[in-house]
Image (cartoon, grey):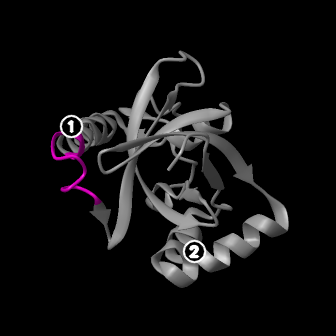
Amino acid sequence: MSSGVESGTLGGMSALKKTLMSKGNATHVALYRRTGGRHFNRIKGLPVGLITLPGRKTRTLRTTPIVYFERAGSWLVVGSAGGAEADPQWFQNLRMTARATLEIGDQRHEVSVHTIEGEERDALWAWIVEKAPFFDGYRKKSGRTIPIAALTPTTQM
């Protein structure tokens, strides 16, 4: 039985794919910030922001482009990872922190983090799938319950 390391994979993802994704995210973040969010601000027709939060192990701040949905004074974020079997690293980090920074365009918002569970999560999932049906395809592909978190501004919007 292979641990994955011998075959050139880490956590089910090849080392090359991880490197390419990391470099792609870094480029996306840099271009988003350079243009004040005027470019690289949509994916599949949905708005994109940048979330900055500490790594759960290193506590090093990391910034990741994420899709968000505005609802009831908060921004909802979804840990779909495009249908991967595991939650994305940024969402795993999000679960381990109470605060983060969300950049939308050229505005920075300090936010509190609340992972949504149970019936509330299920109702919000239905609302998200209504707005962006492809997320249900990610759920089916992943075979997992895709997590949702609410980011609520702690500073004036």
Q: Which residue is mark 2?
A: 128
Q: Residue at x 75, y 71 (%)?
A: 122
Q: Which residue is mark 1?
A: 30
Quarter where residue 155 is shown: top right
Is 37 contained in the magenta span?
A: yes
- Segment tinted magenta in the rendering: 32-41
Q: Residue at x 58, y 59 (%)?
A: 76
If the image is split into quadrants, where does the N terminus sit? Answer: top right
What secondary structure is marked by label 1?
helix
Above or below, 70 relative to 101? below
* Residue neighbourhood size for the residue with mark 2, other residues' Cα within 10 Å, grouped as few (<14), some (14–19), many (≥20): many
Return the residue nearer the eye: 73 or 30.
73
Residue flagged by tag 1: what amino acid is it?
Answer: Ala
How far apart are labels 2 and 1 at the CA level?
Answer: 28 Å
What secondary structure is marked by label 2?
helix
Residue 114 horizontal side relative to residue 22, left or right: right
Return the residue nearer the eye: 6 or 68.
68
Q: Residue at x 31, y 64 (%)?
A: 43
